[in-house]
Image: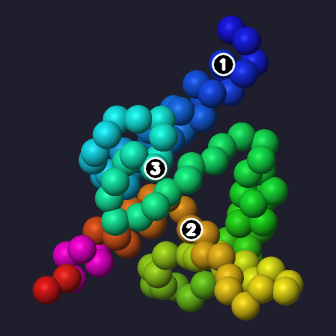
Amino acid sequence: MARGKRNRAKGDAKARRARKRLGIAGANSRHEELWGGALRLEVKSGAQVAPIATRFRAAEQQSNASRSLGDVRPFVFVAMPDGQSDGLAIMRLSEFSDLISLLGDAAP
């Protein structure tokens, strides 16, 4: 299999996993724009996300090292880039999915 086709198949598989984890129904498409749901998503995988994953894991380890016993709050990595007033919030997909479920249950 050619490298481009292999990369595309790997990316499609990761996107399907993300979609399933988030419980998103709608069009079964490789194009996230057609998924529908309450969130606009863009799923990235492979080497392009390795630096983000490395920074996330380091911050998570730092947080876990100083976490109090019994603290079950999910970890969120917040990145505040220079020259920008808004930040980025990054968390594990499993914990994000649980959080979305909790918020949905709490809605009136």
User: Marks 1/3: CA distance?
Assistant: 21 Å
Q: What residue type is labelled 2?
A: Met
Residue 22, placed above or below residue 84: above
* Res 18 seen here: no
| Residue 52: percent from left, percent from top | 75, 60
Residue extending furthest toward the front: 34
Q: Which amino acid does label 1 sit on?
A: Lys
Q: Is residue 48 magenta?
A: no
User: Marks 2/1: CA distance?
Assistant: 29 Å
Frontmost of labels 1 and 3 is 3
Residue extending furthest toward the left: 108
On the image, numbered disc 3 is attached to which residue? 33
On the image, numbered disc 2 is attached to which residue? 91
Q: Residue at horizontal 34%, vertical 54%?
A: 36
Residue 80: quarter of image: bottom right
Q: Is mark 2 on a helix, strand or loop?
A: loop
| Residue 47: percent from left, percent from top | 78, 42
Mark 2 or 3, nearer chain start: 3
Q: Work out whether residue 73 or residue 91 is closer to the camera in this orientation and state it.
A: 91
